[in-house]
Amino acid sequence: MPRKKTNEEFIAELELKRGGEYTPLEDYKGNQTKIKILHNICQKVIYIRPKDLLVNGVKCPHCSGNAKLSIEDMKHFIEIESNSGCKLLSSEVKNTQSKLNLKCQCGNKFTTTFSFFKHENKRQCNDCGNRNSRISRKHTYEYVKSTIENEGLVLISTDYLNNKSLLEIKCLRGHIFFQSFNDFLGGHRCKTCQYEDNSEIFKLDFNKLIKVFNDEGYKVLSDTYVNNSTKLKLSCPNDHEFEMPYKDFQAGNRCPQCYLNRIRENATSHIFTWLREQMKDWKIASMKKHNYKCVVTGRPMNVVHHVYSFNLIAKEVMETLNMPILSSLSDYTNDQIELMKNKCIELHNKYGLGVCLTKEIHNLYHNLYGFINNQSQFEEFVTRYKQGEFQELFVS
């Protein structure tokens, strides 16, 4: 039976895999046991299994639109946001897949689920749907065929129902794809061609690519390069071998083994990790100060960065209190724990709030300046970024 990971190991793994996007509000109880976790982007608290975040890649349900909705939420969407003219007649509902009784704008009553209403556009009774379908069927098959084939494409479908029905089309390169005439008129075309074109656009000369890696002490072990989404076999300055696509390297990601080693080196004891967990109020205040935006790029943030290194603060806590660094939190008395927590909060207030950064900017900063940092280093980094020194690193 595998050993259960500690709370500190869970926090470190969550930071590594989800880039500081989530903050646990409860101690880790096991991979399958739900705990409260704060999503730092939307500031919503979710109740979720650690396994879903670490292994399954589940996203915040509030941001992805999968959060459980109340009957009031559904009523607001149906009667106001959708602009459908429908009225909700049901007074209770179990979930988005439950049947709802609705009144169409024509006065007829009909039933559907909220999921179908929102995502499948079931926003009218059958009578209105059939009537509108006939009205929307404006074009003849000959007109549709002529419009498509005037661009050199071939319409394979032999009939046309309406502008929302899928048509089978062959593109100039021979790819078969399916698309509605409405989407075709909107400028959509063969996605396979689009992918191929993007791959060529983002493709870098192999010799130039090798130079980019060599300039940072990395070696390219792969013999060929397809495009920036294809994994390359690499070797870092510490001779760890790993695989990574060029686009991830551009985004600031580096050797995962070195990253894990840095976590172990910087978290010199369990007490340092525990002290970091006690700074949730400081972290939330930092995000609010910067409106949840990266102070360098203005984009949505992923990480709250200590301008004055947390390791230096934690070390100062221990030295000021003349407290030994022990291997486990349980080795300290309750009074000692309270003293360390209060001193850490005091020093965080002394050195000021953190700054919000994207994961890519945060990784780049620490790759350049290491993990013992101060205000002047950060100001220098921001100046270098604004002057365009790192521009080529962020070109897709």
Image: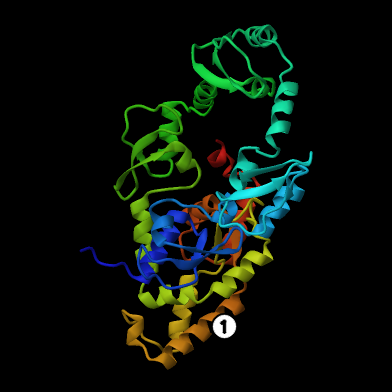
Instruction: Name the quarter where the N terminus is drawn.
Output: bottom left
Instruction: Look at 65% across and 56% down and name the residue there.
Output: 293
Depth check: 196 or 366 in front? 196
Name the secondary structure under disc 1: helix
Residue 112 coordinates in the image, percent (x, y): 62, 44
Q: Quadrant of residue 107?
A: top right
Instruction: Look at 32% across and 86% down and name the residue there.
Output: 331
Residue 362 coordinates in the image, percent (x, y): 53, 55
Residue 321 coordinates in the image, percent (x, y): 45, 89
- 52 left or right of 66? left
Tell me the crowding category of disc 1: few under 14, some 14 to 19, or many 20 or more residues within 10 angstroms, Cα based. few
Q: Amino acid at mark 1?
A: Glu
Instruction: Name the quarter where the C terminus is drawn.
Output: top right
- 359 left or right of 323? right
Depth check: 220 or 192 in front? 192
- 234 left or right of 42? left
Instruction: Look at 32% across and 32% down and name the residue there.
Output: 222
Residue 229 coordinates in the image, percent (x, y): 45, 34
69 w.r.t. 107: above or below: below
Q: Quadrant of residue 30?
A: bottom left
Number of dots carrying numbers: 1
Name the residue beneath numbered marker 1: 346
Depth check: 220 or 84 in front? 84
Q: Quadrant of residue 29?
A: bottom left
